[in-house]
Amino acid sequence: MKTLKTYGQMMRRYALWGMLLLVMLGLAGCDQAEQEAGPADGTPHEGMFEVTFFARGGEAPAGAESRAAISGPSDRVQTLVYILYRKDAEGRYAYYKQATVFRPDNYAVVEEHEWPLPAIRETLPDGDYRVVFLGNLDANLFEGQGQEAVLQNYGTYFDEARMVMPAGGPLAFTDRNLFYFASADFNQDAPQVDILLQRIVTRHEFQREFVDVNSALDMLVSNIFDSIREQQLTTTVVGGLLHSALLEPVAKALLLDESALLVTQVVDALVGFLTTPLIDALDEALLQNKVEVLTRLENTLKTNGGGADLLGLSNVLNPWAISPGADVTGYFVTEMDFDLQPVVASGQVARTWEDIPMSKQAGEELSVERYLTLILLDGANRIDKIDIKKEGLVGPLVDGVVDDAVLYGRLINIENDLSYEAQPNVAYHTNYAFLNLTLDNYGYSEEGDPLELTAQLDSALVTEELLSSLLGDLGGLIGGVLLRPLLNAVTGVLQETTFALNVYLPDLGIQNIVVEGGWEPVTSSVDGQ
């Protein structure tokens, strides 16, 4: 009995100790919870403060120059994280922590999120901080990205972080993975932080003006005629025609030998007066040969191009209308820091984004408004060259002639530089305007088939009074008796002579044709996408 009693007492004692232990643990747990939660009124402990992000519900802060904030359900931002940096003793913002606001469980499924977002709160030790919100800076959102991160070096210091163009370049972006960014400084004295995400990639449209073939050919013929005027329809050449026609009749009228000084002086005076009217008359004859020049151009294209005609030239003048895409070469921003400044590597080389597809207005089979769209990081971008994909250019003219890089550069590709600075939330558009259809070389050979220009001058151009005025002091040497025979001789030449001049065309082969153009001023508009 004594043994049993002792055993019972021991059991009751153990039970009492157990209850006391549980009470002590409970009290300790309550004390720890109170210590983590802070005072009963919800304010942080001394030395701590609570920061609130999206303090205005995602509204734009006063004076912010940006488009309106997203409101309602939207799928534009698929992932959102924020990174906190704390200022250290040296004044640099060092990595403190990172948190995910949302990301999809399945990246293949597009998710919508309600905007503006609810407030996000953090309790932090007193100090100076910088927060960075990043939308869609997630490699999983970009097809073919692999293991290469689009957000790099962010885990050390704010100024070392980099946002990187996806491996797929402009084609990697869609309306649901464009980069979004916001940054703000705060501390215990300014704990309410307005956050407004802004897109840090920009939509660029490059359009090539559609060339009307008839207008372009008119321009080409006009340029050819200008070269003929400059090289062949000169005062020297036309003056020679007049000199040959006037020399003998003038010498006979003056009863002198053709080599006589007076004959030369009189002929020179007449040639000086009549050259301009004859040039004008021959120029008018030249203009009447437009159809002939176009016919010869077409025949040249047929010979060199295997049967193409002038209509086939339309494909060459308007390659964007029939090409599936282009390769764009230039100097592009491929990295940005968290200050939204481009990071340009030393010795930067040109980069080519390949197979950028042509876009066109919906419902148009052959659109004159075809354009290329690139989505690029903000900053200074420069287009050096746009190479059209040859697979889209078909037909005898192209297959038979346009077969080398030099020709493509002259006629089809764009090799003019275009530079401008891109800002956030702005769409940019520029047009490559057709300026001229000309020739690379206007040299000519007299072995070719010439154009024969013919013209006559009105004999009424030369009167007795005009002749006396032209001769001046020479009139005293000639005398009044010979003035009338001289006038009759000159007017007789003008009445009876048809002046003829052979002019020669330059090389009309397509390899000598050059399309000249240039970029018009870049226009911009607020981009709400």
Image (cartoon, rainbow, N blue to C red):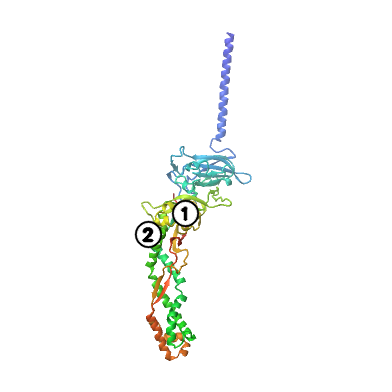
Q: Nearer the viewer, residue 421 or 41?
A: 421
Residue denoted by label 2 = 311
Instruction: Give the mark nearest the N terminus, 2 or 1.
Output: 2
Q: Nearer the viewer, residue 417 or 302?
A: 302
Which residue lies most toward the top here? 1
Which residue lies most toward the right here? 90
SS at badge 2:
helix
Q: Is residue 318 above or below residue 231?
A: above
**Residue at (57, 50) in percent of width and height:** 345
Does any portion of residue 232 appear in the rendered image?
Answer: yes
Q: Viewed as shown, does residue 310 lie left or right of 415?
A: left
Look at the image and tell me in which quarter the N terminus lies: top right
Residue denoted by label 1 = 387
SS at badge 1:
strand
Between marks 2 and 1 in the image, the one whose residue lies nearer the viewer: 2
Residue 373, image x, y percentages: 45, 51
Q: Is residue 139 above or below residue 294?
A: above
Q: Nearer the viewer, residue 11 or 275?
A: 275
Q: Is residue 382 above or below residue 195?
A: below
Residue type at tag 2: Leu
Q: Viewed as shown, does residue 217 lie left or right of 4?
A: left
Does any portion of residue 191 appear in the rendered image?
Answer: no
Residue 91, image x, y percentages: 62, 46
Residue type at tag 1: Asp
Q: Residues within 10 Å of mark 1 (few under 14, many from 20)?
A: many
**Contact check, label 2 and label 1, Cβ < 8 Å:** no
